[in-house]
Amino acid sequence: MNNNQRKKRKGNRKNLPPEDLFDKPQDYYKGEILKQYTHSKSLMRIQERLTKRALNIISPECPSLVLDLGAGCGFSASYLYLNNFSVISLDLIFKMLIEYDISELNPINADMKFLPFRENSFDYIFSISAIQWIINKFPIEKLKKILIQMSMDLKRVLKPNGKCIIQFYPKDESILKEMGIIFSDYGKFEGHFIIDNPNSLIKKRYYLYLKNNK
């Protein structure tokens, strides 16, 4: 391998998303990276825009109780809270939840794959820029089992006619079909995908809208 090839490979690796470089989000979001993420004004603005768009898609009634899956340090949950929603924020990384005083966002340290809530707990569920750590990590057969468990968990904790909106970045669009089948057949959800800016590599955004018709 010559020097140009080595530089190209190194540059390509730098451009990969963190879920392609690290086995678990805890391995990436720590130390200086965690500080940079949690104190980034640009990331906060991006999260707020994505949350605003998610609100526009599901048109929720207010007041209501919202679960924020993969809440991180609370960028999306804070926006929901400031718009008069009661919020419970769940994240796998404990240090994310204590970077700021977010007690009003009811932070819970838990795994989104196994929701520690009672049946019919929430009016709405939001997940912004988090689920790609699941869908982009596992081989398809293991991923199917995880998504089946998630779909049934989401169904269980949502109230009748409750809605869920998941914004994510898939590695490729082949997973969309599997997600659609699983959330329909196992979660018994009604829903569809929304793709904003479909012709833009940079601005393309994926949303999965789900409604609990039970």
Image: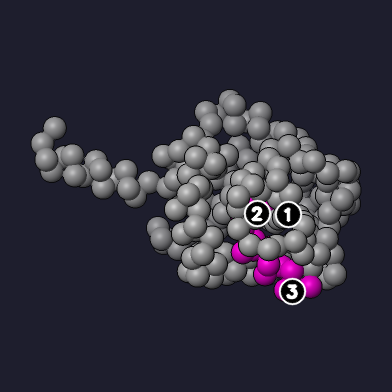
Name the residue: 77% across, 37% down.
152
Name above or below for residue 189 compared with residue 194.
Answer: above
Q: Quick check: 63 left or right of 55?
A: right
Q: Which residue is mark 3?
A: 83
Category of crowding for the residue at label 3, using alpha-carbon neighbours closer than 10 angstroms: few (below 14), some (14–19), many (at least 20): few
Name above or below for residue 27 compared with residue 102.
Answer: above
Name above or below for residue 130 compared with residue 85.
Answer: above
Residue 179 picture location, percent across and down: 63, 40
Task: Indicate the quadrant containing the N terminus: top left, top right, bottom left or bottom right.
Answer: top left
Inspect the image, locate mark 1, and give the three-letter code of the amino acid beneath it: Pro
Q: Secondary structure at mark 3?
A: loop
| Dots 1, 2 in contact, CB < 8 A | yes
Q: Which residues are magenta?
A: 69-84
* Mark 1 and mark 2: Cα distance apart in space: 6 Å
* Mark 3 and mark 2: Cα distance apart in space: 20 Å
Residue 115 picture location, percent across and down: 76, 41
Inspect the image, locate mark 2, and give the three-letter code of the amino acid beneath it: Leu
Name the residue: 54% across, 70% down.
45
As drawn, the residue found furthest toward the left would be 2
| Dots 3, 2 in contact, CB < 8 A | no
Where residue 107 is drawn, which disc sits there?
1
* Mark with earlier residue (3, 1): 3
Where residue 97 is drawn, which disc sits there?
2
Which residue is nearer to you in this view: 101 or 107?
101
